[in-house]
Amino acid sequence: MKRSIMIGILAIGIAAVVSTQQASISQSPDAAAIKTLNEQYAAAVNAQDPARIVSLYATDAIYMNVNNPGLVGRDAIRTNFENSFKNLTVRDAASTSVESQVAGNWAFDRGRYTYTSVAKAGGQTTKVSYVFLQILEKQSDGSWKIKRRMFHSDQPAQ
């Protein structure tokens, strides 16, 4: 009985420490910068501006797109978005972080990304929703850039 009570108290104490640490991370300047990067990403997608999108990536970034091999470097990532925007109009893009952790000059960010796409041929409208995981690197100027980004749909397979 005493052991169960001690384990319960220990669990509550650990949860309180973890909760405090997560709150301080989520309110840190780095977490705010990562949130801003995600907002800039969504705004650049809404503007259909591949140059703005790739400016948020490190020069040697890898973009792991759904059903495609990983795209290495800004040029490949830019070409991917240019080709997508030739066929689709994207609107209402939004990116929401669910979990971010910073460790020195590295961070990971997990979240949800949504947008509406409209096919330029035929006008078919599709609401898109996926989850993402990205690894970011802090640059010498203090900004954060995406080093790796991968995502998949959070909707059931059809």
Image: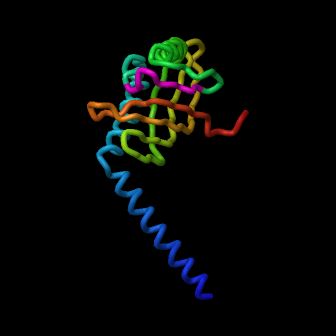
Residue 55 is one of the magenta-drawn residues: no
Q: Position of residue 132 (x, y in %)?
A: 53, 37
The mark total stands at 0
Q: In the picture, which quadrant includes the C terminus?
A: top right
Residue 64 is one of the magenta-drawn residues: yes
Front-most of 135 and 150?
135
Q: Position of residue 141 (x, y in %)?
A: 26, 31
Left or right position of 47 against 141? right
Residue displayed at 47% across by 24% down: 61
Main secondary structure type of the part rendered in magenta? strand
Residue displayed at 38% across by 30% down: 145
The relative height of residue 153 versus residue 26 in the rendered view (above or below) is above
Point out the residue furthest to the bottom here.
Answer: 1
> Which segment is the magenta one?
56-65
Left or right position of 104 against 147? left
Q: Position of residue 60 (x, y in %)?
A: 45, 22
Q: Position of residue 99 (x, y in %)?
A: 47, 48
Front-most of 87 and 51?
51
Residue displayed at 46% across by 41% down: 108
Q: In the picture, which quadrant includes the N terminus?
A: bottom right
Residue displayed at 31% across by 33% down: 143
